[in-house]
DNA sequence: ATGGTGGCGCGGCCA
């Protein structure tokens, strides 16, 4: 069994107690983090190591920053997305327990048509090329993180309100489909769902209390690995804690 | 209503 999770923590400095508390009960084999907002010298590796997790991190001050915590050793680490001449720390890739894991913090995109939106689409094109190449060498691959895209209307609390807005626009969804077309499955959609679930709720407008959310934190698996996926879930509990991240953890289990 | 809340860091940007 391999249990993997992802969580955009929106500052690991603020959220460290939340992450430690969550790890104690969820006990995944790997947790990937986004928006750590920490320089590498400030990463709290000792706190995780005392719980039995090894740490990889690629950080920067104030913005972005990604990390991977794993029980097993990590090999063949990649921290830069090929094709992007980019100081933004948004990707971290390593092999753990024979599984190629790609942790991403996809650019938000600000608003449709903005410069940041163009950067987001460019970043996603380069990501698809990177994943396509990685799949040639690694049949067992997981691509997970904060995608800043709700794949379909069923991932949105109010699709009409969000129609062609950032996180939901047709070009973003096409870029997401291009990622799937490299040979990946959205593990959440491998299982029947009775009602909509979300992984992110805006801090404003009491969005969490009113469940006005989007499902933008995703775990994608290559087809050989998707065939071994036994569950894919969203844990809303940490979003209820005091001073929470605006995202909550999502996780998947594989019978490997 | 281009609002609102939160993190960083101390004015304004980013989400």
Image (tube, coloured by chain):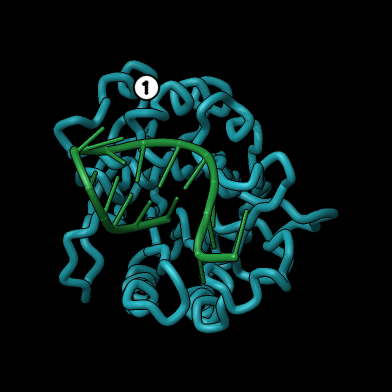
Q: Is residue A13 above or below residue A222?
A: above
Tell me where residue A156 appears, x and y as whole percent: 69, 62
Q: Colour of chain A?
A: cyan
Residue at the image point whose x is 47% and y is 77% from the top:
A112
Q: Is residue A50 above or below residue A141?
A: above
Could one spot residue A56 in this view of the protein? no
- The front one of B8 and A217 is B8
Tell me where residue A210 appears, x and y as whole percent: 74, 45
Q: Is residue A178 left or right of residue A121?
A: right
- The front one of A29 and A224 is A29
Quarter of the rendering occupied by the N terminus of chain A: top right
Q: Is residue A36 left or right of residue A158?
A: left
The residue carrying mark 1 is A52
Which chain hosts label 1? A
Q: Callout 1: helix, strand or loop?
A: loop
Residue at the image point whose x is 20% and y is 46% from the top:
A60
Residue at the image point whose x is 47% and y is 35% from the top:
A29
Q: Colour of chain B?
A: green
């Amino acid at each position: 069994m391999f249990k993997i999770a992802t969580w955009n923590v929106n500052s690991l400095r603020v959220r460290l107690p939340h992450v430690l508390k969550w790890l104690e009960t969820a006990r995944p084999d790997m947790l990937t983090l986004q928006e750590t907002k920490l320089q590498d010298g400030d990463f709290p590796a000792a706190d995780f190591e005392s719980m039995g997790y090894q740490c990889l991190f690629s950080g920067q001050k104030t913005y972005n920053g990604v990390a991977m915590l794993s029980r097993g050793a990590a090999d063949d680490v990649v921290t830069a997305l090929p094709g992007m001449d980019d100081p933004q720390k948004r990707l971290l890739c390593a092999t753990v327990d024979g599984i190629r894991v790609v942790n991403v913090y996809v650019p938000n995109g600000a608003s449709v048509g903005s410069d940041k939106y163009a950067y987001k689409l460019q970043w996603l094109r380069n990501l698809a090329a990177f994943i396509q190449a990685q799949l040639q060498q690694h049949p067992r691959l997981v691509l997970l993180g904060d995608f800043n895209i709700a794949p379909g209307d069923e991932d949105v609390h109010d699709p009409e309100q969000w129609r062609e807005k950032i996180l939901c626009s047709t070009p973003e969804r096409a870029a997401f489909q291009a990622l799937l077309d490299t040979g990946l499955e959205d593990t959440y959609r491998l299982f029947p769902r009775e009602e909509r679930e979300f992984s992110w709720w805006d801090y404003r407008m009491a969005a969490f209390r009113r469940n006005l959310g989007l499902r933008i934190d995703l775990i994608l698996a290559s087809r050989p690995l998707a065939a071994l996926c036994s569950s894919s879930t969203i844990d809303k509990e940490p979003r209820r804690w005091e001073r929470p991240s605006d995202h909550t953890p999502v996780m998947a289990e594989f019978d490997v």
